[in-house]
Amino acid sequence: MPMRFAMLLLIAVAAWGQEAKQGKQEKGPPPDPTNLKVLKTKSGAEVRQIMRTFTTGLGVQCVFCHVQGNFASDENPKKDAARHMIQMTADINRQFPDSKMHVSCFTCHRGEQEPKTAPEPKAQ
């Protein structure tokens, strides 16, 4: 009985090691992005970081603007709207003499899909 258990344990550990090795091969650096029209980067890691700020700013997931499984696709019209917003914030930030980012998605959206254009009415 102990010999069978040892063999079973050895097989399980070997199989787990193989799965872990395959998982590491699939990870690694993200692929270089394609179909960039507004963003000025070519690094997959940099694009991922930028996209995280967008998803946080709007409180959405990637598929809000992208077609799942095909991030380069332009089929989702929200992607074009996002490009216009990215350009708008870049244009606004260029107006500041210190070259710092003063305006971002979060400035207006505050973690919501639709930006608030007026304060909430006060409860009476």
Image (tube, helix red, strand yellow):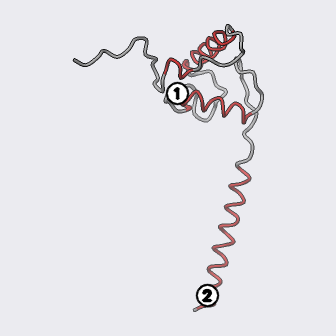
Q: Is residue 68 left or right of residue 24?
A: left
- Residue 87: where, in percent of width, then height? 65, 13
Foreground of the two, 48 or 101: 101
- Residue 62: where, in percent of width, then height? 56, 32
- Residue 22: image quadrant is bottom right
Residue 64, numbered circle: 1
- Which amino acid does the dot numbered 2 rest on? Arg
Looking at the image, which residue is at 59% across and 85% down? 5
Above or below, comparing residue 10 to residue 15 in the picture: below
Q: Quadrant of the C terminus?
A: top left
Looking at the image, which residue is at 67% across and 78% down? 10
Looking at the image, which residue is at 43% across and 11% down? 117
Name, please, the residue furthest toward the bottom.
Answer: 1
Residue 53, numbered circle: none
- Residue 46: where, in percent of width, then height? 72, 32
Mark 1, secondary structure of its residue? helix
Q: CA distance from mark 2 to mark 1?
A: 52 Å
- Residue 66: image quadrant is top right
Above or below, comparing residue 94 to residue 7 in the picture: above
How many other residues sit within 10 Å of disc 1, few (<14), some (14-19) or many (≥20)?
some
- Which amino acid does the dot numbered 1 rest on? Phe
Q: Is residue 105 left or right of residue 23?
A: left
Mark 2, secondary structure of its residue? helix
Name, please, the residue furthest toward the front.
Answer: 98
Marked residue nearer the N-terminal end (2 or 1) = 2
Q: Quadrant of the N terminus?
A: bottom right
Foreground of the two, 115 or 67: 115
User: In front: mark 2 or mark 1?
Assistant: 1
Label 2 close to label 1 by CB (< 8 Å): no
How many other residues sit within 10 Å of disc 2, few (<14), some (14-19) or many (≥20)?
few
Which residue is under mark 2?
4
- Residue 41: image quadrant is top right
